[in-house]
Image (cartoon, rainbow, N blue to C red):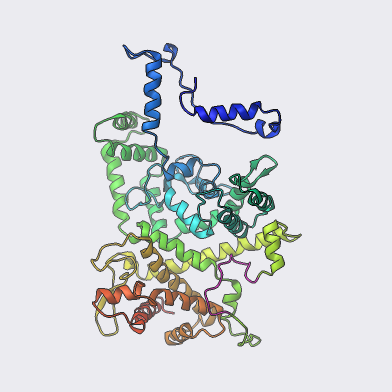
Amino acid sequence: MALDGQHRLAAIQQFVAHPRAPQAPLRATSVPVIFVVLDPQFGYETPAPRSLVEVLRVMFIDLNKHAKIPTRARQILLDDKDPTSVCVRALVGETVTGGIADLEETPPRLPLALVDWHTEQAKFDDGPYVTTILTLDWAISALLGAKPVQNFMDYGAIRNQVKVLSQWLKIRMESAYQRLEDLESVKLQPFSYSDSPDNDELCLISTAFQRFWNPAFISLLTEFLPYRELIELRKADGTLTLDFSNWYRLYHQQRQDPYDGRATQEYNQFVGRLQLGDRPIGEEKLKRLSAEIEAHKRSLAFNVVFQRAYFLAFREWIRVQDSDLYDLEPLEDVDPFGEDTDGEAEETAPGVAGESDSEVSRAESGDDGDDGDEVATAFATEVQRRTREFVSCLNAVVEREPDILQHDFMIERDDGSTQRFWAGTLITPQDTIDFTQGASNRAKEVLFWVVAMQMYDRHTDPAATSDFDAFWGETLEPEWLSYMKRVKRSVDRFTKEERSAGGRILKARDDEFDEDASREEARWRMEWLWRVLEL
């Protein structure tokens, strides 16, 4: 008998029995079913004095009364129909293994030993990880601009998602566009991505993400100095093993089990096996190793609000075109009166700026022409180059000023006074970390400046000490340079409004908002960075 889902079962039975039911889709369709076998051969014991019918009634009530929507982390790991979830799973290792061999696979993957995959939280300031499944899900959505679709009959939102996936993954999605067009004409059915053997769009998305973005994410999370040092520490202390990974997972679950329930029992059994194994290790040593890792993580780099800012700054940098950088170089044939817009430019992927209407049409139809793979290869190369630039520039400032990633890091102003470097961005007026998304948005500007200024110097006058005032003048009046217009827009976001970072700094000092004073907060932070980096 059907204990739950009776209406769905009746609908399926009616559909299958229909004389015009399409046979091919039926054969390709699977339906998840949970069998409850109430038989003594499987260990079932009837709770006296209840009859079987009474037991089933209680189960039915429990199922419906205590049903829970799966958490977002669980959905990401299980949802085969959501493009972002598919990309997350394409990025991380398929199983928990000892060591970090996944980094050397083809395609490379982020080892689960470095990713919190088993809890339902975004934060990772404790534990042995450099990121979490939830943060990766957020970062991929933010980078691609592929906002999660809540309603699959919202065809406009779906079209938007398909468009950015096509753009940032360089894939042909003509069948998805065609289905969308058909559905929009009747507006009776929800859209779904195809996973059929002859048109597996989700596999296409997964494969393309691995090609273009797995190397980038892996570089961001293993080569940035704080993350690289944590990985080196874990290599040295032997905590990249499968035993340690499993121990920490069970240890975390056991700490959430105040009544010594199943989690505590599993933990104690596992610790017992470790103590009696071929290479015995005690619980106290495991706890000490865990504490040493957490002590190493006393840095903003291991705070989710910083990591989100880090990914957002990368998103800003990845949108810089090669042509933007070439414009900085002193070429005699550059037209100083070339037309450009001073407004907020439309977000495009590297290598696709300035597409003609016909090119956009081809992107939507999936017709890349004969040079599709050449374009994709060039795109992959450019993504890798932008990633190397981004990580190397941030490593440069951390190497020169290691304390910059401490939340209470102070810098000196021209008048001799001091102020917290992250004031107005990651730090509240009460000197606590601001965990909001707004804080990440404000801090991303500072991280973007670190990269933008160094790359400006590399392309203008790398051999000599450059004049910051000249750079600042070009930032305020970028004229025809699209690169400097990007920097100006970043400074404007930092300073233009009362709720901006500059406005918050002024408010914390009980000063009235003044745009010039707010802009000054950006200027002297940038000038301090300029001096530290010896540009």
User: Residue 258 location, x and y as percent?
Assistant: 24, 35
273 or 381: nearer the viewer = 381
User: Residue 257 location, x and y as percent?
Assistant: 28, 35
Report if residue 391 is visible in the image. no
Q: Point out the image quarter for the C terminus.
A: bottom left
Q: Is residue 243 magenta?
A: no
User: Residue 464 location, x and y as percent?
Assistant: 48, 84
Q: Is residue 199 left or right of residue 34?
A: right
Question: Residue at image x 28%, y 37%?
Answer: 283
Callout count: 0
72 or 388: nearer the viewer = 72
User: Residue 485 location, x and y as percent?
Assistant: 51, 79
Q: Is residue 187 above or below residue 341?
A: above
Q: Is residue 320 left or right of residue 509?
A: right
Q: Is residue 343 magenta?
A: yes
Question: Residue at image x 30%, y 70%?
Answer: 423
Question: Residue at image x 60%, y 50%?
Answer: 205
Q: Is residue 503 above or below residue 380?
A: below
Q: Is residue 73 left or right of residue 177?
A: left
Question: Residue at image x 42%, y 67%?
Answer: 444
Magenta residues span 341-354
Report if residue 148 is visible in the image. yes
Q: How would you classify the magenta stretch by its main secondary structure? A: loop
Q: Is residue 519 above or below residue 115?
A: below
427 or 392: nearer the viewer = 427
- Taking the view exactly as shown, the residue that stands out farthest to the right is 370
